[in-house]
Amino acid sequence: MEKVTIRDIARLAGVSKSTVSLVINNSPRVDPETRGRVLAVITRHNYVPSATASALAKGRPPFISMIVPGLTWRLVAPLNYGVASVIERTPYEIILYTSTNDHDYAPVIDRMLASGLSAGVLVINQDQTMQPLLDLHAQGVPVVLINTLGSHFDLPSVEADNYEGAYGAVRHLLDLGHRRIASLAGPMTYPCCQDRQRGYQDALTEAGVPIDASLTQQSGFQPPTARELVRELLERADRPTAVFAHNDVTAYAAMDAAADRGLRVPEDLSVVGFDDIPSSAHVKPALTTVSQPFEAMGEHAARMLLAAISSESASSESASSESGEGSAPGGHGPPPARVHLPTTLIVRDSTGPAPS
């Protein structure tokens, strides 16, 4: 006879695996009717929780789960550093999960819940379906997004101010005398790219520069595509004198396209990027770019998660000291915090006065 798993218990009880985990760990966030149904299924099938889940129930130091898009993703290292600089000063340890090949977060959440040791979850979000994270949060598991896409969800999140970053970058080009400024846009399905494009357009409008739609090109964050698009722009008689790229790697592609045309950066074409990844200080010429506060985002998100875990623990103790009935998941409360951290324009060698 095959061993019964937490997935089987969830299916038979008609609930999610996270709800089963909450019942196992005595969380008051599960309503009494659901708790009774889950416990009945556990008893009927002689389900024995894993040793790690039992350890959590006994109050041993739990872990913080961190879900990242992939370990080779350029922004993981500084974000991880910020998280670790906070978590390492607490009794918690970090378990790292990757969602590289998952179309939504359900499989990675399954792996996380199977261990039973996660007190809370930090997620560097990408474009996976977010519903599993929303369900997890609604069931009482603290979840905080390190929101690199600027997505709008009912989850606590930390993100950079993409609008102000883009506005400041274009304002810098305008102050140098540029009036034909191209935008090398990322995927416009991403809220962060929508905010960067709004910042670009508002800076032009406030300077009295008409918006030329043909100067916005959709690169999709793909350097080969970006290089070809900029090459085509530079073949025009009314070519741009500056390019604002929505990320650094497409800014590099813009500089390559200028070299293809025999143009110099910044004498003939100024280029500004966004992100300030480490290589941007070392390309030739060094890239002027908008620095996102990745380490600070990781630190702030970690502190938000620890505060949520402490609040959850306090709520559990309060509930258990009352009538013994737990509060139902998804109770009313203040909306989740959404924190915007400021960006900084780092002026280097890739921008200069507009050519006369």
Image (cartoon, grey):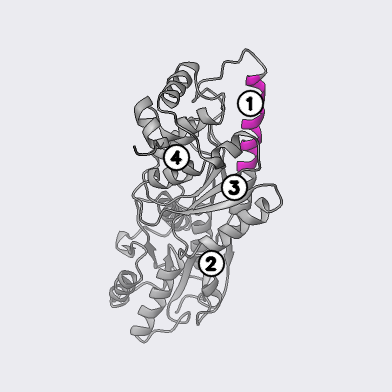
Q: Residues within 10 Å of mark 4 (few under 14, many from 20)?
A: many
Report the front residue among 274 and 50. 50
Q: Give the residue type that dot 1 points to.
A: Ser
Tell me the magenta residue range: 305-320
Residue ID for mark 1: 315
As shown in the figure, which amino acid type bears the numbered disc 2?
Asp
Secondary structure mostly seen in magenta is helix
Residue at the top extreme?
323
In this view of the protein, which residue sits in the foreground, 66 or 35?
35
Q: Nearer the viewer, mark 4 or mark 3?
A: 4
**Can the viewer see residue 240?**
yes
Q: Which residue carries the number 2 mark?
A: 276
Q: Are the residues flagged by discs 1 and 4 in contact, CB closer than 8 Å?
A: no
User: In this view of the protein, can residue 146 be seen by the observer?
Assistant: no
Judging by the rendered image, the residue that carries numbered circle 3 is 301
State yes or no: residue 310 in magenta.
yes
| Residue 185 figure quarter | bottom left
What is the C-alpha distance between the residues marked 2 and 3? 20 Å
Rendered image quadrant of residue 152: top left
Q: Is residue 262 above or below residue 60?
A: below
Q: CA distance from mark 1 to mark 4?
A: 21 Å
Residue at 46% of width from left, 63% of height from top? 73
Q: Secondary structure at mark 3?
A: helix
The residue wearing badge 4 is 133
Q: Is residue 177 left or right of residue 233?
A: right
| Secondary element at image label 1 | helix
Which type of secondary structure does the marked residue at label 2 adopt? Answer: loop
- Report how far apart the C-alphas of labels 2 and 1 lie in the structure: 41 Å
Among the two numbered marks 1 and 4 on one chain, the one whose residue lies closer to the N terminus = 4
Q: Residues within 10 Å of mark 1 (few under 14, many from 20)?
A: some
Q: Residue at x 34, y 37 (%)?
A: 1
